[in-house]
Image (cartoon, helix red, strand yellow):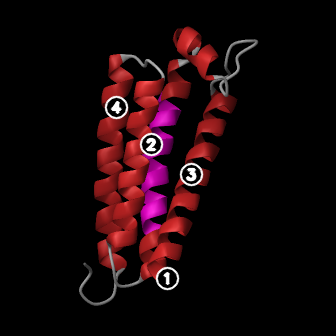
Amino acid sequence: MKYVLATLAGLMVAALITFGIESLGTVFFPLPEGANPTDLEWLKNNLDLIPTGAMIMVALAHVIGIICGMLVAGLIAKNSMIPSYVVAVLMLLGTIANLFMIPHPTWFMFVDIVGALIGIYIGKTLVSNKLKGNPV
């Protein structure tokens, strides 16, 4: 049960951190007038209007969200990497799904996937250094 709670807490933290950083990106790099980033059709038709800085913030949000989510899951689990791995895989799948749902520029797809993989590596390293005993 502890591992399930660790996984859910890690996913919640990952999602909140990701959302927060993505939202912060629109503060620093405002969207065009009339933009509706919650409307999938608007995004599909107007992605070229999104500032590059805001897109970079989205990729950065995925990296930091994965790291934080994995760390929280690992700290709660205390002796297993499995909850952190589940968080990592689900966040990576969410990142990939987003790339399929909305047509992104090639550079962004590369940065987003590589960034997510780097986030997983950093998250794994941080969690494995914090776990007690022999982490699985």
Label 3: element kind: helix
- Whichever of callouts 4 and 1 sits on the residue coming sooner in the sequence is 1
Question: How many residues crowd mark 2 within 10 Å: few (<14), some (14–19), many (20+)?
Answer: few
Q: Amino acid at mark 3?
A: Ala
Residue beneath the point at 41% across and 52% down: 90
At x 48%, y 60%, the residue is 68
CA distance separating discs 4 and 2:
15 Å
What stretch of residues is rendered in magenta?
A: 56-71
Residue named by callout 3: 15
Which of pointers 3 and 4 indicates the residue nearer the eye? 3
Which badge, 2 or 3, comes first in the chain's sequence?
Answer: 3
Mark 1 lies on a secondary structure that is loop
Which x, y percent locates residue 81? Answer: 32, 73
From this viewpoint, which residue is outermost toward the bottom? 133
| Residue under pointer 1 | 1
* Pair 4/1: label in front: 1
Residue placed under numbered mark 2 in the picture: 94
Rendered residue at 67%/19% (across/down): 31
Q: Is residue 57 shown in magenta?
A: yes
In the rendered structure, which amino acid carries the disc numbered 1? Met
Return the x and y of residue 30 as percentages of the image width and height. Answer: 68, 22
Residues at circles 3 and 1 in contact by the CB criterion of under 8 Å: no
Q: Upstream in the sequence, badge 3 or badge 4?
A: 3
**Compared with residue 61, is residue 125 higher up or lower down, i.e. above or below?**
below
Using the image as rendered, state which of residue 63 and residue 36 is in the foreground. 36
Q: Is residue 131 left or right of residue 59?
A: left
Residue 111, numbered circle: 4
Tag in front: 1 or 2: 1
How far apart, in angstroms, are the residues tagged by discs 3 and 4?
A: 19 Å
Q: Secondary structure at mark 2?
A: helix
Q: Above or below — where is 22 with respect to 39?
A: below
